[in-house]
Image (cartoon, grey):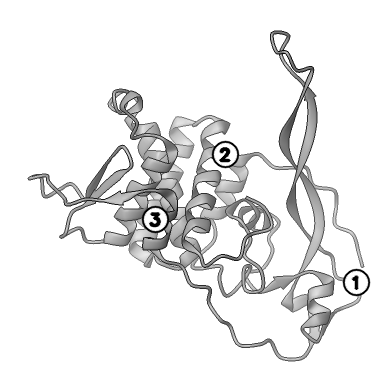
Amino acid sequence: MSERPPIDVPKSRELLEGLLTLAGSTGETYSRFHRYSPRNLGFLALQNCPPEPIATFKRWQELGRHVTKGSKAYSILRPIQVKVETDDNSDEQYKLVRRFKVVRALFAVSQTAGDDLPPYCPPGWSVDRALETLGIERVPFENYDGNIGGYARGNKIAINPVAPYPLRTTIHEASHVTHGDTTPENLALYQEHRGQFEYRAEASAYVVLNELGALDEETASVSRGYVQGWLRDQQPPEDDMRRVLNVSTKILDAGFEPEGTEES
């Protein structure tokens, strides 16, 4: 197989921007044979991997197909544990931290030949399962402002019964809870950091809904524009990008039937 040029581990900002270029659900494309995390979906998009089914060399063989000669593998990010020195004030000399390494592993179906692909069987994802797994409770909506689609307090969310996009609003509010925005301490900081909190929740919801194919063209454009505008104008810190990827992964995993991903 041919080799692609070496790739460094990208920043979370780059991965998120890659995710924003993906149109529609990746269930029938990147994640058809294995459920990859948002982090790796963004990484594949950054490499200009075509939006089609992907798999390892061995998996394609199992499916009755072979990778064509000269094909170059696309890379994914694998989690690793790295030992680093702790602060001087710590009793422990070293600690283990999570990092990622680049691994060349995947080929697109257009790089293979052989048997027809098996029928696509979409995995089951349930918003009720996600909320239960995350410990988030739905409560009645009690707000007289009809312009508010929903709100979150503690581990409780309330959705306006006339919200035009109830699933989108539910995931947005669940993202607030999962980000920790709804603790008493952070609620007190909401007005001061509203842009940051709303950006993180909207970006996380966008990643989740786009992965599920639950955004129509209009709402996807509005949501993507909001997120990209904040990325461009406000320059959120790298930690916020990382949190968006982690929270969206957590919500997706919570709603799928048990299977697991290659990393979180």
When asked about the image quadrant of residue 179, the answer is: top left
Which of these two is toward me, 213 or 69? Answer: 213
Estimate the spatial distance between the alpha carbons at disc 3 and disc 2, rounded to whole Å. 24 Å
Q: Is residue 76 left or right of residue 45?
A: right
What residue is rendered at 56% in x and 65% in y?
258
Residue drawn 37% across and 41% down?
176
Seen in the picture, residue 72 relative to 233 is either above or below; the reply is: below
Tag in front: 3 or 1 = 3
Q: CA distance from mark 2 to mark 1?
A: 35 Å
* Residue 255 on image: x %, y %: 46, 61
Amino acid identity at mark 2: Arg
Q: Please tell me which residue lies in front, 21 or 139.
A: 139
Residue 232 placed where, x, y %? 48, 37
Please, what secondary structure does the residue beneath circle 2 have? helix
Q: Is residue 112 left or right of residue 15?
A: right
The x and y percentages for residue 130 are 42, 57
Checking the image for residue 262, the label placed there is none
Residue with the mark numbered 1? 70
Q: Please give the residue where the numbered disc 2 appears in the rendered image.
A: 242
Identified at 40% across, 66% down, the residue is: 214
Q: Secondary structure at mark 1?
A: loop
Q: Quadrant of the N terminus?
A: bottom right
Q: Which residue is mark 3?
A: 132
Closer-to-camera residue (244/226): 244
**Residue type, numbered disc 3:** Glu
> Is label 2 or label 1 in front?
2
What is the total number of numbered labels drawn onto the structure image?
3
Q: Earlier in the sequence, mark 3 or mark 1?
A: 1
Residue most toward the bottom?
Answer: 115
Residue depicted at x 64% and y 59%: 261
| Left or right of 238 in this view: 194 | left
